[in-house]
Image (cartoon, rainbow, N blue to C red):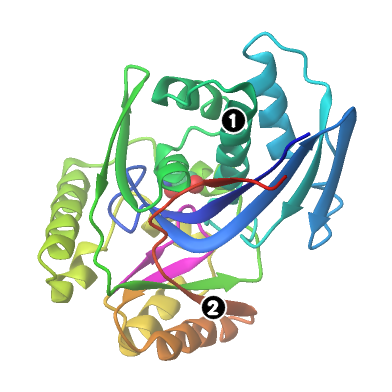
Amino acid sequence: MKVLKVKVPATTANLGAGFDTLGLALTLYNEFIVEEHDGVVIETEPRNLYLEDPEKNLFVKVLKYACENRGKTFHGAKVKQINNVPVARGLGSSATAIVGAIVVSSAVSKIPLTDERFFDIAYKFEPHPDNLLPAWKGGFVTALTDNEKTYYNQIDFPEDLKAVVVIPDFELSTEKARSVLPEKISLKDGIFNVQRVSLFLSALQNRRYDLLKVAMDDRFHQPYRKELIPNFDKVLENAYDAGALGVSLSGAGSAIISLSNENFDQIGNAMVEGFKEAGIKAEYKVLDIDREGAKLEILE
Ligand code: HSE
């Protein structure tokens, strides 16, 4: 009987102006250790009773769906879930579960994991390729969905940049963070973002880090979402004062990320301080870019 382990990276989507488009994998991982079992048994580390409920555990739900999707009966699984990616902070914790389960189910069924099969299953649970793709493939990815087909491309990301991620002590669901967005945006704001995404990609390509600050500004989502994040502007200001090159909300929030090639701890502490002034506890992590994506290991 095989025991499989899949390790899936956290992700940060958007990176400012690249709303619903850009995503980056980070060196923070959730792990899922799975073996066949009659019935579902879930163990979590650290202990999380919500995730131990088979009806609620996303990894198990996707595993079951992926199995039934190819006409098989799902008999159960024994799952040990090691959670390092904080939930509902805009760091792709749901994507780790979805990607992990799809990778495991493909390995078990020996069905090649094509893009078509991946998206067919993944989109039943989360419609955001900007999280799903970096979690699956690693690195820096740009993605779009057109007419039910997903187009994507991996882009080089400079080796010397790290992400300083500040994680406040409150959850923000993607659903809530999307509910505050307007239905329509003006042409002016559209142009504002298109210009910045282009500048961002070119600044990374030719290491013009002086351009990252202006390139990571945004008018599509952050101006609306920041109302849900106390002291958002102050956290950004503190990060820039401490030497950050570019700062943005991570995904739908509530975490905020700074890109930098130095002063990592100063930036992290300055961002934590920004939240503290609003009475919010926070911690920071200095992370590299994960370049491998989901990794499957056969344990025995
Ligand atoms: N791009 C999506 C958003 C990511 O910002 O809502 C959701 O995880």
Residue at (32%, 89%) from the top-left corner?
241
Up the image or down, 289 lies above or below 141; here it is below
Q: Quadrant of the C terminus?
A: top right
Among the 4 quarters of the image, the one containing residue 107: top right
Q: Is residue 176 left or right of residue 20?
A: right
Residue closest to the eye, 101 or 184: 101
Q: Which disc, if any, is residue 236?
A: none
Q: Nearer the viewer, mark 1 or mark 2?
A: 1
Residue closest to the eye, 108 or 45: 108
Residue 180 in sight from this viewpoint = no
Residue closest to the eye, 15 or 141: 141
Distance Cα–Cα, label 1 vs label 2: 35 Å
Q: Is residue 188 left or right of residue 97?
A: left
Q: Quadrant of the N terminus?
A: top right
Up the image or down, 290 lies above or below 161; here it is above
Q: Amino acid at mark 1?
A: Ala
Tell me the element at label 1: helix
**Some atom of ligand 1 lies within 8 Å of the CB belonging to the residue at label 2:** no
Residue at (77%, 14%) from the top-left corner?
73
First to last magenta residue range: 246-258
Up the image or down, 33 lies above or below 159; here it is above
* Percent position of residue 106, x then y: 57, 27
Q: Which residue is mark 2?
A: 284
Q: Amino acid at mark 2?
A: Tyr
* Percent position of residue 207, x then y: 14, 70
Q: Which residue is mark 1?
A: 107
